[in-house]
Amino acid sequence: MRTPIPILHRTERLVVVAKPPGLLTAPEKGGPARSLVEVLAEEGVVAQAVHRLDLEVSGAVILALDDEARLALEALFRERAVTKIYWALASGRYQEARGVYRWPILESGPEVRVDERGKPAETRWTVLERHAVATEMEIELVTGRRNQIRVHFAHGGHALIGDRKYGRARDQKLRAPSRRVALHSWRLAFESPFGDGRVAVEAPLPDDLLELRAEARRSGGGPTLPRSGPRH
């Protein structure tokens, strides 16, 4: 029996849930899988997507519960008023403790790549822990281009573990390779446009990423900064 979608935060106007991997965020014509919106409707939560996570990506997603709320929440994302923090496991071993990728991203049909003709894109990252063959990262997504984090890290020579689209199976040095990209929407924070104050929600790492992190730690290395990432 399928486990219900975890609800992390809910008001009369919005809901924040933990999307499992393998679901689209919203229905797509000819899409490869069912969507989070459809599954929630089956569970009695009729909601509208205001932003999206990739099919393979898990974690916190905000959805609107009415048309007016959708417009207000979409405006927050356009204005970059939502703090979006991700957890990721990148291939290789970073030497720097933190940095920023600011490569423009060109979206042309199914292709997404770094290209000077593309739109500005900014990804900030901080190393949480270095391992022998991978680096655990905290990532702040400043802009929201399609596949932005995955494209930026691949272009920087540290494709995310399990990323078959951009990374070409670079997790092969792990004894238990990831079945999907090691990327998780860990924390969302914003001022409610409905007068409910500051909203800050965290989504725990799912079991498959906990297992992958444990495997990376067994490969060697050690903490770089105090372990401030998701604990469970």
Image: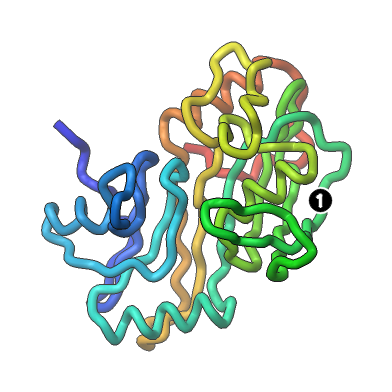
In the picture, the quarter occupied by the N terminus is top left
Q: Residue furthest front?
A: 109
Front-most of residues 162 and 82: 162
| Amino acid at the residue labelled 1 | Arg
- Residue beneath the point at 36% across and 86% down: 194
| Front residue of this view, candidates 27 and 87 | 27
Furthest-right residue in view?
A: 95
Q: Residue at left 83%, top 45%?
A: 97
* Left or right: where 81 falls relative to 221: left
In the rendered image, residue 205, in percent from the top left (x then y), is placed at 47, 39
Q: Can you say whether 187 is above or below 194 in the image? A: above
Query: What residue is at 47 percent from the left and 76 percent from the top?
Result: 198
126 left or right of 47 in image = right
Residue identifier under label 1: 98
Disc 1 is placed on an element classified as strand
Judge left or right: residue 201 versus residue 152: left
Count of numbered marks:
1
The answer to whether residue 108 is above or below residue 153 is below
